[in-house]
Image (cartoon, helix red, strand yellow):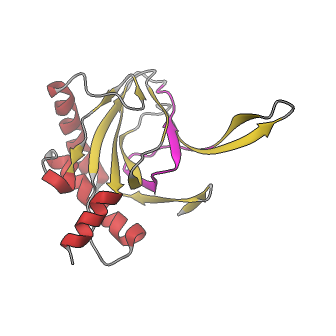
Amino acid sequence: MDKIFPHHVYKLKVKNYKKLNEKLISEIYNLRDDNKLGIRRSNRGGWHSKDYFVHQDCNAPTELLNMSKIISNFYSENVFKNKKYIEVSTIWANINEKDNYNTPHTHPGSHYSGCYYVKVPKNSGYLYFINKVTSLTPPFNEFKKIYDEIKIKPEVGVLYLWSSELAHRVGKNKTDKDRISLSFNFSFNDIEKQLKEQE
């Protein structure tokens, strides 16, 4: 576990990730074939699937649902630590092709967010965590944003978890190969709902 700005960022190398990723790659490309437009959030270019609401309807595709269970176990044991099992609220897939990237953003309304790397060609984009600092710039007393960043090199089969208020972005994919990842949220409202259900 690393402390960044001074947020906690959790990291897990998923067991048997190679077989898992083979299935995920096939499923994610099938999802894109069924909805080629996808949606636009922080992504500039590339493909972003719709959000799948795991706890509310469990209609996520099979392999995304299997991955959400791994994420949920890791979150429950290492972050929540309340002897309660908390499921992922939403999960979605991302494909960044050449020159695609993701702009700085946070995940409002969520407790923890993260990503899992399914396919990461060399030079296909780093993950950046951003520290937003506002300072006065004399002599005009204007506010100026200063961005300090921590760069993380993505690894296939690795899962990251961080506080949803921590700003982050994804660098440009400089290769001709696709970069594939999953992203997810644990939302405040959904956690509260799940805890009530377990009382």
Query: Which residue is depicted at the point 61% across and 59% down?
Result: 6
Residue drawn 71% across the image and 34% down it: 144
Q: Residue at x 49, y 50 (%)?
A: 165
Front-most of residues 13 and 185: 185
Instruction: From the viewer's perspective, tell me whether residue 168 is left or right of residue 114.
Output: right
Number of marks drawn: 0
Observer able to see residue 193:
yes
Query: Residue placed farthest to the front in the image?
Result: 141
Relative to residue 16, is residue 170 depicted above or below?
above
Magenta stretch: includes residue 145: no
Residue 163 point in image, percent of width and height:
47, 56
Is residue 171 located in the magenta-colored stretch of the structure?
A: yes
Q: Residue furthest right?
A: 139
Residue 93 coordinates in the image, percent (x, y): 29, 38
Return the x and y of residue 155 as percentages of the image width and height. 44, 46
Read off the magenta span: 149-173
* Residue shown at the point (17%, 54%) measured from the top left: 56
The one of 54 and 18 positioned closer to us in this rendering: 54
The quadrant in which residue 2 appears is bottom right
Is residue 159 something that shows in the picture?
A: no
Position of residue 34 measured from the top left corner of the image (x, y, whole percent): 14, 27
Q: Quadrant of the C terminus?
A: bottom left
Is 193 in front, or is 162? 193
Image height of 198 relative to 47, above or below: below
